[in-house]
Amino acid sequence: MTKKLPDGFLWGNSVSSMQTEGAWNEGGKGKSVYDIREASEFASDWKVATDSYHRYREDFDHMQNLGMNCYRFQIAWSRVCPQGDGEFNEEGIAFYDRFINDLIARGIEPMVCLYHFDMPLALAEKYNGFTDRRVMEAFVRYGKQMIDRFGDRVKYWLSFNEQNIFHMPEAFKVAGYLQGDQTLRELYLIQHHTMMAHVYLTRYLHETRPGKLFGGMLAHQLVYPATCKPRDIFCAQQYDEFLNQNLLRVYAGEGYSPEVLAVVKREGFEDIYREDDLALLPTVKNDFMAFSYYASRTLDSDAIPENTPVNYYLLHGDKPNPWLKATEWNWQIDPLGFRTIITRYYNDWRLPVFPIENGIGVIESWDGVNMIEDDYRIDYHREHINAMKAAIFEDGAQVIGYLGWGLIDILSSQGDMRKRYGVVYVNRENHDLKDLKRVPKKSYAWLQQVIHSNGEKM
């Protein structure tokens, strides 16, 4: 068996718009829910980010020099449709038109994600985000417009970043939800509306752009039972079903999990799930399975109060795994878990697998002179790429590519510039923008070697 990754294997970088673009009030952009968030002690505001709206060509040049041939980015909904459900902004659309063309000119495959948590503020204020079906309909309208505008050049499409987050308590932070009691019913409204939007847009791409590929994406929650105690194992499997497998089943054209639908019925949420919705789910199948992976988790069932909804298990039962090392953010490093997910995805669904976020966030600073010696980042990516190769060469998985997260430094998901994932340092801090200079770290040359050798030189 050959041990070489296939020609055309995709190596690249993933980001969101609000963590990179800045230009929050330029180019006709409307406000998003992020634009009204204020800075705090350990978080920036979102008005400048890394200023990629003005500097993206410099970042693209770094990616091209690394040898990257794929860039997964997000279109900011409120940049192209300022109110979320009104007139489209031609100036914003023209920006992404140039953006995509500049990628292609550098031999970099564009991959579009349509939503990465930055709900247009107008929709959040009017409808409370994805709790309302009208927001789902507005999102589908926006997504269709983007497919119409860019589908001639963009092969890979995603609806939602880390879609299973809409099934977790964190959903209320990322779904445009501004007020309410954060009830379980509202959580199920959010998860169903986002899934139906995903299904409608998958169908639309397949109907209008033959040969283009639509995928679903999870923040895969690999959860180990804390012990071999049967209840630990049962609860870990329940959590996997509700937060991972339920979505994967829809992506694979099977519809929702019977176990999840049983809870829907027991809780009295059946009215959320229209008959025509449920009939549509099995008619649509994704072209690839995508996921982000940073760390695994461990679940102690003894810490879960009685009658806790499965979606909330980790709020109570999450515990450190004594067999794994952790980052300073307490994310436990587990390359074997990465292999486990890739192998299981392909075993179960026979669809190409695409890990599109992977990396290690570390507090780093630059002295203005010397290169940042980030051997820990080299070690992290080497171990995870080798785990991916084992899934391919030893386990038989089909994998499209490997995308790191924020490989040119960006704001963290919480707005904290201290938490850096990049192989390129961006010279700014949370409250001091400095000059935003891009400075390669030691890991830059290492990753360049990996990519140029298509994974041979590690």
Image (spheres, helix red, strand yellow):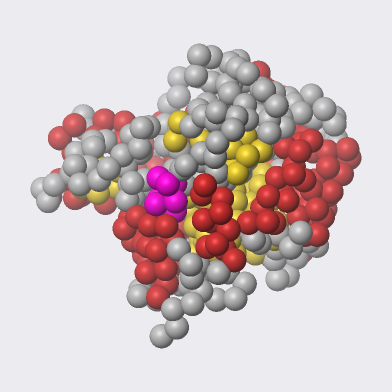
Q: Quadrant of residue 445?
A: bottom right
- Say above or below: 85 vs 60: above
Q: Nearer the viewer, residue 204 or 221?
A: 221
Q: Percent x, y for residue 113?
A: 64, 48
Q: Quadrant of residue 122?
A: top right
Q: Residue at x 56, y 50 (%)?
A: 444
Q: Percent x, y for residue 302?
A: 15, 35
Q: Quadrant of the N terminus?
A: bottom left
Task: Inspect the magenta stretch and tell me whether residue 379 lies in it.
Answer: yes
- Say above or below: 94 vs 9: above
- Say above or below: 143 vs 249: above
From which residue to which does the magenta span run?
Answer: 375-381
Q: Residue at x 87, y 44 (%)?
A: 94
Q: Nearer the viewer, residue 64 or 180?
A: 64
In the image, 324: left or right of 349? left
Q: Percent x, y for residue 371?
A: 54, 40
In the image, 65: left or right of 272? right
- Say above or below: 408 vs 1: above
In the image, 192: left or right of 426? left
Q: Quadrant of the C terminus?
A: bottom left
Q: Percent x, y for residue 359?
A: 47, 47
Residue 261 appears in view: no
Q: Residue at x 27, y 43 (%)?
A: 325
Q: Nearer the viewer, residue 410 or 397?
A: 410
Q: Nearer the viewer, residue 201 or 217?
A: 217
Residue 170 appears in view: yes
Magenta: predominant secondary structure element? helix
